[in-house]
Amino acid sequence: MASAGTEKGASPPGRRQLLGFLLGSSVFASLASIFYPILKFVLPPPSGELDSDTVVAARLDELAPSAAKIFRFGNRPGLLIRLPEGGYRAFSATCTHLDCTVQFRQREQDVWCACHNGIYDLRGRNVSGPPPRPLEEYDVHERGEEIVVARREQA
């Protein structure tokens, strides 16, 4: 009398299970590689933006005249410049050409994009190079000992 596990013509259960596992996992991997990019495209990414449109960019005593500081404004960089006469200006620190981060050059008194040598003046206007439009300008307010930067209202 033959036992149930050793019937004539039957494969050992180990090989059959291994083959079934490999076939099933390859089907699963194929479906995942098809549907994952579709889901990433359809579902919006998590937003890193701040809930408000204002941020504390610096302290009043932090910047000397003709100095600048990069600060975080939501998920993008901002540039706060203290003008030689003592006032402040703030811009988006993202170049309007290819989204490189711009920097303030103290000696030249301008804002410079190192990616393709784009230059902006201290009002954010594109002066030379490939940038197609001016930098986005922010409103700057002094609140106590802090410098607060806010998005401008769209008219």
Image: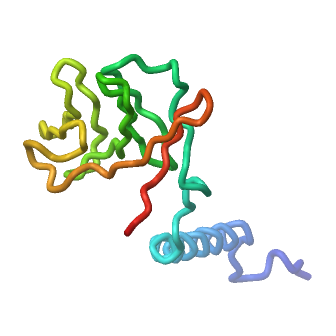
In the image, farthest residue toward the front:
85
Where's residue 114, x and y in %? 19, 34
Where's residue 75, x and y in %? 49, 49
Determine the image quadrant of residue 7: bottom right
Along the viewing direction, whichever of 30 and 20 lies nearer the viewer: 30
- The quadrant the N terminus occupies is bottom right
* Residue depicted at x 61% and y 57%: 51
Where's residue 128, x and y in %? 8, 42
Along the viewing direction, whichever of 15 and 36 lies nearer the viewer: 36
Give the vertical position of 141 relative to 153 (above or below). Answer: above
* Residue depicted at x 15% and y 50%: 131
Along the viewing direction, whichever of 89 and 4 lies nearer the viewer: 89
* Residue depicted at x 74% and y 82%: 8
Determine the image quadrant of residue 70: top left
Give the vertical position of 108 relative to 151 (above or below). Answer: above
Give the vertical position of 50 relative to 104 (above or below). Answer: below
Locate residue 99 relative to residue 8 in the image: left or right: left
